[in-house]
Image: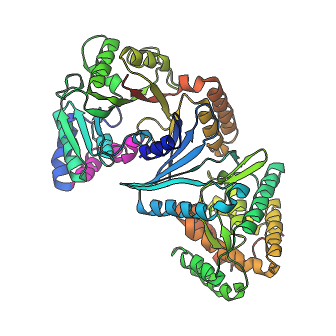
Amino acid sequence: MFHLAADYLRSAGWRDWDVLQLPGGDGVVWWIFRRGQEIPAIVGKFRRHPAAIAAGRRECAALELLSPFAKQLGVPSVLFRTDASGGFVYLQSGAPGKPLRNELSPSGGKLLLAQMDIAEDWLEKFQTLAPPAEDSGVAFRRVLAGASTELPEALLSAAYAALPGLAAVPAVAVHGDFWANNVLTSPGSVSVVDWDTFHYGSPVEDLVTFAVATAYRWGFDAAQGADVIWNVLLGSSPLTVRTRAAALRILARWNLSPDLLAPLFLVALVSRLGRTELDDNPAWHVFAARYAGAGLPLPLAGC
Amino acid sequence: MTAQEASLDEVRRANRLAREIGWRAAVERIVPGDAGLICDPCRADFQYVWDLPRDSSILSAGDDWGAVATALGRNFSRVTAVESAFERARFIDIRAREMGTPVEVVCAELLHLPLARRQFDAVVLNGGLDWSALAARGGPREIQLRLLRSVRDLLKPSGFACLSVDNRLGWGRMRAVGGFKLSLAGYRKLFHKAGYGAVRAFHPWDGYRRPSVLLPLDHAGALAHYVEFKDFARSGWRGWIKRLALRAAARTGLWAGLAPEFIFLLENG
């Protein structure tokens, strides 16, 4: 499959390159370097299976939609895309920088707070530049319709019940997998990669995703992982307090009442669980059951 | 004998069963411990860095259950698998037919292939330099050279060989004996002497039996960039030390010399 990428490179005037291959999205990812350079100039993706191909197409569509703001947001540009026999190949511009750190203690620390600052600043720019969905009601209903069938019924019905109260809330652009590894920083720049779960939805979804993922411990079992999620979303750690403050600032920017934090959190949670977490991570199953069992307590109360 | 090399008797039983219940179920019943590896199509993931179109012709050797040949057959229109043991050749044939992949099986010794010259765009040798030296008479270096030259004969002028080999000096596997495995410099010399042109060396991070992660050893910056994305956080302080060590290994060139396994792409000189 790389010959398709190589043909593009030759047509763009490249004579030589080095490629580093990684598995990704049921296919492979290529980091393509110019000789002697430290950052991949181009990132290529080959997707094989129908679900992965659909995700690849979604990513291309998101990047094309965001292309007017690509520079300001540090979003890659689609350079080339083609259907190949046996899959879908696309190339995008490489992003400079190193990923932010994972598995930080929610009890605070300079690094944790600095990363939250980076995330909040970028989200503000993103939500300001990328226009919201034209019809937020449709967008929110689409989010809930895509919910996993494994979600506790109480959670899903509460989210549906909250919809009428969100009539005046914009369904904003959501990256959908906004965690430390997808946020690359270098002096003076922040880039965000992996856009295949882009959608419109709750203004606090990316923030909540980022906060939880930053503190999550991958070595933990499902129950311990659920403890971490609970601690971030419903505990009183400095990370929870910081996340609440950022969430309230997001609501204020959209002229929304702080009372909307709870229903918007519910929509965000259903979206997050439905899109990736319930497939990948048993800790979220445990958390979702616990949260529903506890009567859906107020999130990010921070006390 | 490697983890997935079964005895000929096991392969015979697998052949009988495969005709009744299918190749995959036969493998799962006869060699359950190795079934995951034998059935894994990712065994040929090195093909995704090849600059070759679909209508290319590929030769695969040293792939005793046919995992590599059949995975190549999904993406290339003409694949030939070479296997010296009749029972294994038969299994590959049954597997390829059942999967509907265009794999033609030739039962022959790699050093005496009954195939026309200059017909393949790529020749894959899985651990080929090791077992060829073990299987034939003569000094290991002489046999390795003969093998590499005979592979060159099979390649089109624009073709390349793809070799998966162990590093004699690889970290965690220093060997005091054994003339079959070489160091990176030793392999490069060997390839040069066999008449090959440009050589691209990759480190298959998870081993050459799972070649999905391929790191270009001639590009220090790429290796360093990979380290930044590798998540060592879950290993605690050990992960921190590992990250520092790998960063240093990338910058100094030690990584290239000490990678435990290599995958080489050798251009026909």
Magenta stretch contains residue B24:
yes
Q: Could you tell whether A291 is left or right of B107 in the image?
A: right
Q: Could you tell whether B135 is left or right of A173 in the image?
A: left
Q: Quadrant of the N terminus of chain B?
A: top left
Q: Position of residue A256 (x, y in %)?
A: 80, 80
Q: Position of residue B33 (x, y in %)?
A: 35, 44
Snapshot quadrant of residue A228: bottom right
Residue B214 visible in the displayed image: yes
Snapshot quadrant of residue B225: top right
Q: Is residue B155 above or below residue A215?
A: above
Q: Is residue A222 above or below residue B43?
A: below
The residue stretch that appears in magenta = B22-45
At x 67% / y 62%, what residue is drawn? A68
User: Magenta-highlighted stretch: main secondary structure?
Assistant: helix
Q: Is residue A264 above or below residue B71?
A: below
Q: Position of residue A237 (x, y in %)?
A: 81, 61
Q: Position of residue A30 (x, y in %)?
A: 52, 44
Magenta stretch contains residue A120:
no
At x 19% / y 23%, what residue is drawn? B112
Q: Quadrant of the C terminus of chain B?
A: top left
Q: Could you tell whether A254 is left or right of A68 in the image?
A: right
Total numbered labels: 0
